[in-house]
Image (tube, grey):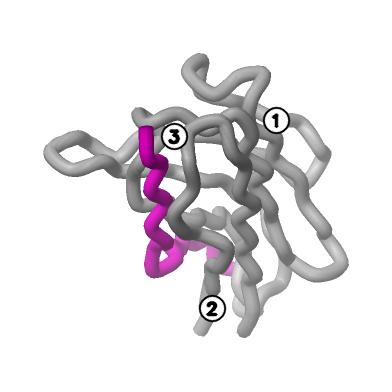
């Protein structure tokens, strides 16, 4: 079994910053990619940012220049630094991991989600 545990969400004023963390643990052989998605009320879940084991990154256009994804491979942890937050960034943020488990099966896992609320 693999668990993704997120932390760092909360309430912040527009223009402020938050840092999300997601730690993967359990029966992991290797992690291919980790990323952050978000889902606002009444909207579909969307990709925010993702990073591969090789260090390449991908961002949604709406967060480019404001959000930075980083990864600590030794700790199986991914971070999302969010600066200059806007009201429209309000959503539940979910961590995602694409990995090979200890049996070498490729699987996809989701965290439980963490609420980010930006007051205008």
Look at discs 3 and 2 and give the one toward the viewer. 3
Q: Assign a secondary structure to mark 1.
A: strand
Q: Which residue is drawn at 80% across and 70% down?
A: 75
Depth check: give the residue in front, 52 or 71: 71
Residue 101 quadrant: bottom right
Circle 1 is placed at which residue position?
Answer: 57
Tag 3 and tag 2, C-beta contact below 8 Å: no
3D distance between C-alphas at marks 3 and 2: 21 Å
Q: Is the magenta stretch mostly helix, strand or loop?
A: strand
Residue 114 quadrant: bottom left
3D distance between C-alphas at marks 1 and 2: 23 Å
Label 3, residues with CA under 10 Å away: few <14, some 14-19, many ≥20: some
Q: Which residue is drawn at 52% across and 46% down?
A: 36
Q: Where is residue 117 in the image (x, y as percent from the top left)?
A: 38, 48
Q: In this view, does 53 lie to the left or right of 5?
A: right
Look at discs 1 and 2 and give the one toward the viewer. 1
Query: Where is 59 relative to 18, above or below?
Result: above
Q: Assign a secondary structure to mark 2.
A: strand
3D distance between C-alphas at marks 1 and 3: 12 Å
Label 2, residues with CA under 10 Å away: few <14, some 14-19, many ≥20: some
């Amino acid at each position: 079994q693999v668990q993704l545990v997120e932390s760092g969400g909360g309430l912040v004023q527009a223009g402020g910053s938050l840092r999300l963390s997601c730690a993967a643990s359990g029966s992991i052989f290797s992690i291919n990619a980790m990323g952050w998605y978000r889902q606002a009320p009444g909207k579909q879940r969307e990709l925010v940012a993702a990073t591969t084991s090789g260090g390449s990154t991908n961002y949604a256009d709406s967060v480019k220049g404001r959000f930075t994804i980083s990864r600590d491979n030794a700790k199986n942890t991914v971070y999302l630094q969010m600066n200059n937050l806007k009201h429209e960034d309000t959503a539940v943020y979910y961590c995602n991991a694409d990995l090979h488990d200890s049996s070498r099966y490729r699987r996809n896992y989701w965290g439980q989600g963490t609420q980010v609320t930006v007051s205008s």
